[in-house]
Image (spheres, coloured by chain):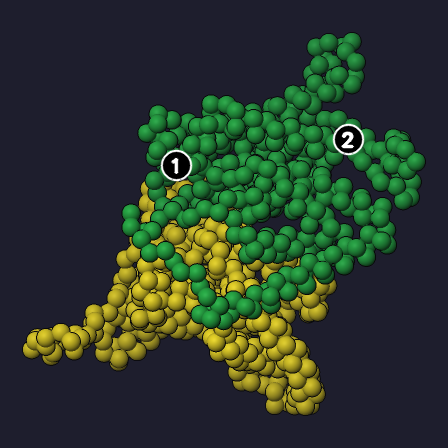
Chain colours: A yellow, B green
């Protein structure tokens, strides 16, 4: 066995650098001055971009493989943060995150795939459908407020009928509008306005938003009845959801009417529209949204639901609504993560969305510590670099069985960590930007000169 | 305790106007039920023999699931842990019997010891030996797993034990996939005894070797009968064990309240180990029978049957032994009928949809007792 020591050192150095970079980023974001934040983010990003670009002879600081790892880590962090919102902060043991990830990936991929093949129906139908379904859900919600105490199954039926009607209308309208747009694509000799690269980027951004919203709406419909189940039963039901979604992916060309998804053979030809940069920006967005949500009154309500449902109810918190909120938000993040992932890899196979892979976000969240955003981010970067990077590269020198060995060593690490530190790597500690902001002194308190003049937020 | 000082007033319909709208949800469920009935009824009328054949294959699946579900339901009943590694113990059972039969010809040992034994007796004794060996190996494996991985985590948060269970499951699957352990490939399984098939058409006839059963006839194999007999026997055995023996009493006590059981002088750790052992021995038996019925094995063989067996246990009401059987039979039928009449790949989807609907209507499963969540 001939392990390249220099290679090992460089790999470890790279991992250390990425972790330091993450820590620095969080620390910079915690600074009050806006310009420090902006400069810090730009500097952190520029550092990595420089490392990607840097090349002396044959030596490159970060090669394509490393940038792929960075990308995967960003996408995985979005999914894991969503799960941490559901499970870590709201206490709902969900195994369905991977299903929403897959839904997001396939939805976005279908939209851009059709667009590059001069077919606007993907964008039109999905976009109109998502907007209409959102409106319907909003409207039904207002309607249902008059009927308190309605059994959840009845509410679910009403929502389902409404969303199905919205979907039908969307398909009809989208198909009717499509012929108007087709001439604008032009032909392959003379590409039209809509075929340009800039428009494709806009479509890509829209596709990501639509994919996230679609995942969120599906999670709303699914979560509404299922969130009434107890903890373990909810876990099994969401596991079932992941399996059902995976089954539908495998049969997307036979049961579902999407021949371009090619079922179990995997969807190919998805335009690779994204880079490490976009994943990084979306991750940043997700982190900021999460952090602001957690430290708002909504976030405190979510936490109270996790701690004690009965007490939360007694304090006037609508437990069911907050559970649903966390579930929908988490699924939204997962959908965005999946959409970004699809446009980096350019190939989607149902095997990547099987429920066995679905344990990965859960393992990351528990690894990092339930209810710790910092822990989740660190754990998912570490997980990707450990499992996909270091182990794959090192073990590839063992021969053809390397992938199997990877999955032999990984559960052992998992077992050791669980035996030695069952509360996860960080417990519920937060660093830098993700730490709870200090609250401003309330008016009702007797104002003291010190608290009145001190800077409010760290 | 001051909980009962103010009795809750029954909610009036004026305060809860939505309660009158329960018929919408019930109508939705009725619609689904009628749809399923329509599909089944139409196909039954069209070809009753095919329908019967599908039900028979569903029975075969269901009884195997029942064997695995027993292990899940017992373990969950006592330690409240979804033992994901149980499905992989099932897989190990299948592999042990494969090696015993194909490599070591263990099923023929009576013929070597006593050459003048009738061949039917040789087959019976040999097959029983193979099954027993699988059960013993699985029991040892499960007890080892419990000691090494689960016992140190008994006081840790439940999620830690769950993650550990997932880790053990992955370990067994991928360690087994190494070349020097089992194999990463599908392996054709060699049965310890021959499959005999009978067809029912104007009486019961044996299907001769090399011939096919005639058109429009129900066929029944000896494997189906063995699986049914073994599964029912184990159900009765377990019922006897839990209801009539001292260790069964200890198991029930530990499931009800662990600290109090400990105070009463019950060695709870031993009881938990015993529970794992019994469940694993059933899984070993189930693994051999499953491999005989569907003779192609690989290291992820146990994942989906294990999951479906757990779903069956939840469906029947977790912690309940007859519930495991009923839930498993429902799962088997749902899977077979969906594969037969809707589409083969949709069978998992339908099984989980049924689970979700049943849980919504009866949150503790069919036989489950309504229990309050402990604080």
Q: Which residue is mark 2?
A: B222
Cβ–Cβ under 8 Å for marks 1 and 2: no
What residue is at 7 percent from the left and 78 percent from the top? A449
Residue B319 appears in the rendering: yes
What residue is at 68 percent from the left and 33 percent from the top? B289
Q: Position of residue A278 (x, y in %)?
A: 45, 73
Could you say whether the residue bearing mark 2 is in a helix, strand or loop? helix
Q: Position of residue B111 (x, y in %)?
A: 74, 14
Q: Residue A400's quadrant in the figure?
A: top right
Residue A52 appears in the rendering: no
In the displayed structure, A31 sits above or below B151; it is: below
Instruction: Pick whichever, B67 or A343, lies toward us.
Output: B67
On the rendered structure, is A282 left or right of A132?
A: left
Q: Which mark is residue A437?
A: none
Q: Earlier in the sequence, mark 1 or mark 2?
A: 2
In the displayed structure, B126 sits above or below B370; it is: above
What residue is at 72 percent from the left and 57 percent from the top? B36
In the displayed structure, A334 sits above or below B63; it is: below
Specify few, some or many for label 1: CA neighbours under 10 Å numbering under 14, 14-19, or 20 or more: few
On the rendered structure, is A56 left or right of A456?
A: right
Instruction: Pick whichever, B217 or A379, lies toward us.
Output: B217
Could you say whether the residue bearing mark 1 is in a helix, strand or loop? loop
Distance from label 1 to label 2 (Cα)? Answer: 43 Å
Chain of the residue where label 1 is placed in the rendered structure? B
Q: Do pointers 1 and 2 mark residues of a single chain?
A: yes
What residue is at 78 percent from the left and 28 percent from the top? B194
Q: Which mark is residue B257?
A: 1
Q: Residue A451's quadrant in the figure?
A: bottom left
């Amino acid at each position: 066995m001939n392990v390249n020591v220099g290679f090992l050192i460089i790999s470890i150095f790279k991992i250390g650098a990425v972790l330091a970079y993450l820590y620095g980023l969080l620390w910079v974001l915690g600074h009050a001055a806006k310009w420090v934040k902006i400069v810090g983010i730009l500097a952190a990003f520029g550092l990595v971009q420089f490392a990607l670009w840097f090349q002396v002879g044959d030596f490159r600081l970060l090669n394509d493989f490393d940038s792929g790892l960075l990308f995967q880590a960003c996408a995985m962090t979005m999914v894991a943060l969503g799960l941490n919102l559901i499970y870590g902060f709201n206490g709902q043991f969900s195994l369905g995150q991977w299903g929403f990830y897959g839904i997001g990936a396939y939805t976005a991929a279908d939209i851009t795939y059709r667009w590059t093949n001069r077919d606007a129906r993907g964008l039109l139908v999905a976009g109109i459908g998502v907007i209409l379904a959102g409106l319907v859900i909003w409207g039904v919600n207002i309607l249902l407020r008059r009927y308190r105490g309605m059994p959840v199954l009845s509410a679910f039926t009403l929502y389902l009928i409404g969303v199905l009607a919205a979907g039908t209308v969307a398909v009809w309208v989208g198909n009717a509008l499509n012929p108007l747009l087709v001439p604008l694509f032009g032909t392959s000799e003379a590409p039209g306005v809509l075929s340009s690269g800039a428009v494709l980027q806009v479509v890509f951004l829209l596709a990501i938003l639509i994919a996230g919203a679609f995942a969120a709406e599906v999670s709303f419909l699914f979560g509404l009845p299922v969130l009434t189940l107890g903890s373990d039963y909810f876990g099994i039901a969401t596991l079932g959801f992941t399996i059902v979604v995976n089954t539908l992916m495998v049969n997307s060309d036979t049961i579902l009417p999407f021949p371009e998804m090619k079922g179990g053979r995997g969807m190919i030809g998805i335009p690779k529209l994204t880079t490490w940069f976009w994943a990084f920006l979306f991750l940043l967005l997700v982190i900021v949204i999460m952090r602001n949500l957690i430290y708002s009154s909504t976030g405190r309500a979510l936490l109270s639901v996790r701690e004690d449902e009965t007490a939360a109810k007694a304090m006037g918190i609508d437990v069911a609504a907050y559970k649903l909120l966390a579930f929908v938000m988490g699924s939204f993040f997962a959908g965005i993560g999946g959409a970004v992932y699809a446009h980096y890899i350019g190939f989607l196979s149902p095997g990547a969305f099987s429920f066995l892979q679905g344990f990965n976000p859960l393992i990351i969240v528990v690894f990092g510590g339930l209810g710790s955003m910092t822990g989740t981010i660190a754990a998912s970067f570490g997980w990707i670099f450990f499992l996909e990077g270091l182990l794959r590269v090192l073990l590839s020198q063992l021969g053809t069985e390397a992938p199997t060995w990877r999955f032999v060593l990984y559960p052992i690490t998992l077992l050791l960590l669980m035996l030695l530190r069952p509360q996860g790597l960080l417990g519920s500690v937060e660093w830098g930007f993700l730490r709870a902001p200090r609250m401003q002194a309330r008016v009702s308190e007797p104002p003291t000169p010190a608290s009145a003049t001190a800077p409010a937020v760290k | 305790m001051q909980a009962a000082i103010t009795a809750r007033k029954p909610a009036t319909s004026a305060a809860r106007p939505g309660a009158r709208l329960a018929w919408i949800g019930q109508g939705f469920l009725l619609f689904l039920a009628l749809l399923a009935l329509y599909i089944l009824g139409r196909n039954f009328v069209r070809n009753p023999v095919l329908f019967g054949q599908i039900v028979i294959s569903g029975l075969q699946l269901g009884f195997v699931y029942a064997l695995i579900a027993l292990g899940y339901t017992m373990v969950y009943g006592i330690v409240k842990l979804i033992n994901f590694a149980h499905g992989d113990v099932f897989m190990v059972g299948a592999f042990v019997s494969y090696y015993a039969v194909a490599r070591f010809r263990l099923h023929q040992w009576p013929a070597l010891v006593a050459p003048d034994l009738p061949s039917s007796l040789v087959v019976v004794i040999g097959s029983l030996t193979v099954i027993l060996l699988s059960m013993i190996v699985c029991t040892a494996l499960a007890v080892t797993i419990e000691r090494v991985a689960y016992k140190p985590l008994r006081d840790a948060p439940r999620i830690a034990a769950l993650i550990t269970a997932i880790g053990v499951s992955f370990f067994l699957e991928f360690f087994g996939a190494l070349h020097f352990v089992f194999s990463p490939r599908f392996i054709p399984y060699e049965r310890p005894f021959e499959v005999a098939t009978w067809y029912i058409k104007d009486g019961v006839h044996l299907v001769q070797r090399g011939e096919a059963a005639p058109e429009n006839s129900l066929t029944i194999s000896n494997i189906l009968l063995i699986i049914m007999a073994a599964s029912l026997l184990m159900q009765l055995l377990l019922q006897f064990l839990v209801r009539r023996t001292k260790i069964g009493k200890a198991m029930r006590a530990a499931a009800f309240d662990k600290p109090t059981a400990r105070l009463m002088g019950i060695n709870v750790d031993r009881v938990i180990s015993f529970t794992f052992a019994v469940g694993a021995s059933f899984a070993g038996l189930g693994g051999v029978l499953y491999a005989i019925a569907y003779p192609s094995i690989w290291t992820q063989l146990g994942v989906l049957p294990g999951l479906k067996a757990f779903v069956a246990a939840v469906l029947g009401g977790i912690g309940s032994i007859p519930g495991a059987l009923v839930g498993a039979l429902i799962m088997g039928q749902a899977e077979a009928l969906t594969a037969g009449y809707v589409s083969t790949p949709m069978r998992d989807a339908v099984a989980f949809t049924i689970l979700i609907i049943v849980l919504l209507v009866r949150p503790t499963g069919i036989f489950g007792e309504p229990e309050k969540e402990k604080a």
